[in-house]
Image: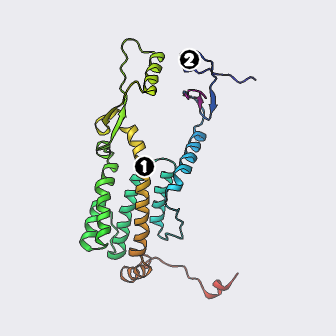
Amino acid sequence: MEEKKFPCPRCKKVKGEEVFMMEKHDMLVCPKCKTSFFLEGKSPLGRYEDDWKKNAEEIFPLLRPPLYQSDLENARLFFLYEDCYHTLLIGRYNASIVLMGVLLETIMKERIWLKLGIDSRGTYGGCLRMMEKEKLMKAGDIYFLRRFKDEIRNPYTHADESEILEGIFVPVYPLQFEGEFSLERLEQGFESVKSGQLKPKLLPASEVPAIRSVVKHEYDRRRAISLFNQVYDFLLAAKIKYFKQEEYEEHCEKFGTRLEKVEHYKVSEKEAESP
């Protein structure tokens, strides 16, 4: 059965050219003008995988080397680190930045548990106040945690795009079409932009809701890479300074393991020696 071909409507309408669109996963894409349409009933998984791989290959060299379980024995911190890292690799920058705040909050909760025996269920701010009060970290590390909360964690957790994009200006080409709209007139506007005939207007991204989310996505990409490397360095430094083996031993002696009242299975020497 002959495969059905679909001519690109934009190329036909605007350029008078017959260019056939190509099927790629769940989309039809014009190889010339890149116009695309989704195909109903097709799985998007292949497209997702292509996007994930492309993004990961682009930013992997810009990130700190990957950590393994042997590098970070604390499972709670390691799994959250992987959440930050993997979401960043596949291009979910906003999610990765939000998770970095969760990771830093969990570092504080682990420190509180280790030194005070308190299984904290409080907020980032509440943990930070306890860390300061009990002097559980050095002043410079407390400052890093507070600055991250105020400048990154709070606006990203609450999706405050205006605050995140404060001071960011972007070039915009506002086009107004008088009379009936058509593809030809839209293409004419694009050509005027490409040729330099129309000059961009710089607008504050934080004040224009229509463009905020698009601008933020690209801004988050650049920001997430830098933030991840900072949080990565903080995590490894915290492991060395605040999660020492002797402190875990002191914790167990002072607070126990919460397994003392659990009935244990007995393993005899004979059973231990059997193959």
Q: Position of residue 248 (x, y in %)?
A: 42, 78
Q: Is residue 223 left or right of residue 50?
A: left
**Residue occupied by mark 1:** 222
Q: Position of residue 161 (x, y in %)?
A: 32, 43
Q: Residue 178 lies in what quarter of the image?
A: top left
**Towards the viewer: 61 or 199:** 199
Q: Position of residue 173 (x, y in %)?
A: 37, 28
Can you tell which mark lies on residue 271?
A: none
State the count of labels: 2
Q: Residue 136 lies in what quarter of the image?
A: bottom left
In the rendered image, the vertical position of residue 178 relative to residue 265, given as above or below:
above
Q: Quadrant of the C terminus?
A: bottom right
The mark nearer the N terminus, 2 or 1, is 2
Magenta region includes residue 139: no
What segment carries the magenta color? 27-34
Q: Is residue 9 left or right of residue 173?
A: right
* Few, some or many residues within 10 Å of mark 1 (<14, 14–19, 20+): few
In the rendered image, the vertical position of residue 223 relative to residue 29, given as above or below:
below
Q: Residue furthest left?
A: 133
Q: Quadrant of the N terminus?
A: top right
Q: Residue furthest front?
A: 196
* Few, some or many residues within 10 Å of mark 2 (<14, 14–19, 20+): few
Label 2 SS: helix
Residue at 35%, 37% (x, y): give it.
Answer: 170
Q: Is residue 85 visible?
A: yes
Disc 2 residue type (three-letter)? Lys
**Residue occupied by mark 2:** 15
Residue at 26%, 68% (x, y): give it.
Answer: 130
Disc 1 residue type (three-letter)? Arg
In the rendered image, the vertical position of residue 63 relative to residue 132, given as above or below:
above
Label 1 SS: helix
How far apart in space, not on screen, are marks 2 and 1 (Cα)? Answer: 37 Å
